[in-house]
Amino acid sequence: MASSSWQLASQNLGSLAGGLIGFGLALALSKSSYSGWGWRVPFAIGVLIAPVGVYVRSRLTETLVKSQRTKSASAAGMLATVIRSNWAGLILGLALIAGGTITQYFLLTLTPYAIRTLHLPDSTAMLGTVTLGVTGFLGALAGGRLADRFGIRTVAITPRVVLVLLLLPVMKFLVMSPSAATLVLAISILSLLQAASAAVLIMLIPLIFPPAVRATGLSITYALGVAIFGGTATYVVTWLVGVTGDPLASTYYVVAANVVGVLAILSVRNADYESEAWPPPADRAV
């Protein structure tokens, strides 16, 4: 489980890099320069990763011989099978993804939230992004390590329940006492809990699908879940605060998503696999 947790941990390293660049720009540039052109600098730097991706892809070796590849079902056929025959698993998988994805994007929006709603300086807000990257990285690795010891179900559900219980009090504390210290503290608490759970949560999804479509089911569920819930989370949380005038309005949305996520975790059968029994058996349904 510890090795699988690097999937989320590496994402948070990206957030850390972005936060450090933004923090440096906020300190180096005036507010007008930062708003006028400085915000484009991280995007220009991000383009530099494209050649690396092309190089890595060109060096990958196909693991299946040609005869095996021609016998495999087409991508369209696999997609149709998952949607037609495993639609209930797809819905359950989306419910699993929803809580973690919405929470992660909610934490990302705390940077503009700190500027627009809490009226903190840009450099302070970007410090929140740096904190999110560091704590998300450490929390994900800790979640993987704990799952090796206590099992997937325990680590997937316990931090998420604690997150549901602490989310509203922590955000109330931040709104009532906005400062660099409270922003860092709030993000640290919420991010550690989110990352520890989310790092192993994705490993429950293969348990939902039969072996023949397990990889396809995982990829479809993850892609759709992040697109639907992650793609709309920023707009929803911003809209809720704007339309209600309540700085905590978006918090209720995140709490509801995590309650759904907890119920989804409890609905997954055989989620008590220990590290010695992972991955799930490929020769029979889980």
Image (cartoon, rainbow, N blue to C red):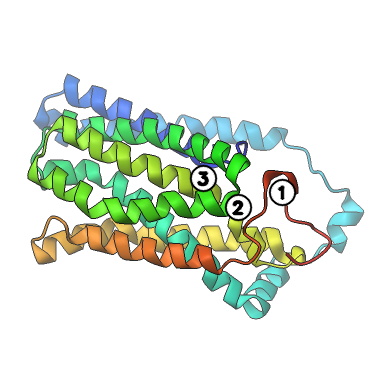
Residue type, numbered disc 3: Ala
Image quarter where the N terminus lies is: top right
Residue 175 vertical position relative to residue 102 in the rendered view, above or below: above
Residue drawn at x 55%, y 31% is 51
Which of the 4 image quarters holds residue 57?
A: top right
Labelled pair 1, 2 in contact (Cβ < 8 Å): yes
Q: Which residue is mark 2?
A: 203
Q: Which residue is mark 1?
A: 278
Say few, some or many: other residues with alpha carbon within 10 Å of mark 3 (under 14 / 14 to 19 / 20 or more): many
Is residue 17 found left or right of 217 in the rendered image?
left
Give the spatial CA distance, label 2 vs label 3: 8 Å
- Numbered disc in front, either 1 or 2: 1
Residue 21 image position (x, y, % from top left): 31, 26
Going from the N terminus, do you reach mark 1 or mark 2 first? 2
Residue 221 image position (x, y, % from top left): 56, 63
Evaluate whether residue 285 shows in this view. Answer: yes
Say few, some or many: other residues with alpha carbon within 10 Å of mark 2 (under 14 / 14 to 19 / 20 or more): many
Q: Which residue is mark 3?
A: 199
Q: Which residue is outermost to the top?
A: 28
Labelled pair 2, 3 in contact (Cβ < 8 Å): no
Is residue 12 found left or right of 112 in the rendered image?
right
Mark 3, secondary structure of its residue:
helix
Residue type, numbered disc 1: Trp
Is residue 247 found left or right of 187 in the rendered image?
left
Residue drawn at x 60%, y 77% is 87
